[in-house]
Amino acid sequence: MPGLLIIAHAPLASSLKAVASHAFPECSARLEALDVGPEMAPEQIEAQARELLARVRRPEALIFTDVFGATPCNVAQKLADGVQVKVVAGVNVPMLWRSLCYADESLDALVARAMAGATQGVMQVSTARPQNQTYKPGAHDQDHRHHQQ
């Protein structure tokens, strides 16, 4: 069961951890978050990330970051070895929840589940337009309940 670490621009990491803990209260022991503030030096971020990674690593861990190429991702890449610690950028709630649902899978399977959750969880949502039916009381309403049919 790999541990999970979220490294993202403040306050996204802690917010995602809160959302995860809301839906999966039992996940708190295997999930940590590091909010990266604009005042933080990369060395400070890396030191804190290493400490948090040590808490969740069992011996494997998956690190989520918000944006590829930004400081959180660059720090995460320094922590990853590609075997027992892997990084996935572009974290979102469906990705995180999918990872928690399949927490007992191997690290490679968890990476695949996270990626699938991220892409399948993003969709355009639209509502159907109203049918523009007007109310017409009529003789066909035998119960006088004014059903639209």
Image (cartoon, grey):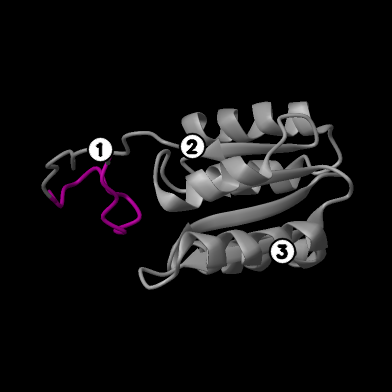
Q: Quadrant of the N terminus?
A: top right
Magenta stretch, residue numbers: 135-149
The numbered dot on residue 145 is none
As drawn, is 146 to the left or to the right of 120?
A: left
- Count how many numbered circles sit on residues in the image: 3
- Between the C-alphas of marks 3 and 1, the distance is 46 Å
Residue 29 in the image: x percent, y percent? 81, 65
Q: Mark 2 belongs to which amino acid? A: Gly
Q: Mark 1 belongs to which amino acid? A: Ala
* Among numbered discs 2 and 1, the one appearing first in the sequence: 2
Q: Which residue is mark 2?
A: 121
Task: Report if the CB atoms under discs 3 and 1 are less than 8 Å apart.
Answer: no
Label 2 vs label 3, nearer the camera: 3
Q: Residues within 10 Å of mark 3 (few under 14, many from 20)?
A: some
Work out whether residue 68 or residue 124 is closer to the camera in this orientation and state it: 68
Q: Mark 3 belongs to which amino acid? A: Leu
Q: Residues within 10 Å of mark 2 (few under 14, many from 20)?
A: some
Residue at 61%, 43% (x, y): give it.
78
Seen from this angle, which residue lies furthest front? 43
The numbered dot on residue 128 is 1
Asked if the magenta segment contains residue 71, the reply would be: no
Q: Is residue 70 above or below residue 35?
A: above
Work out whether residue 23 or residue 149 is closer to the camera in this orientation and state it: 23
* Among numbered discs 3 and 1, the one appearing first in the sequence: 3
As drawn, is 38 to the left or to the right of 117?
A: left
Seen from this angle, which residue lies furthest bottom? 39
Q: Secondary structure at mark 1?
A: loop
The numbered dot on residue 52 is 3
Quarter of the rendering containing residue 39: bottom left
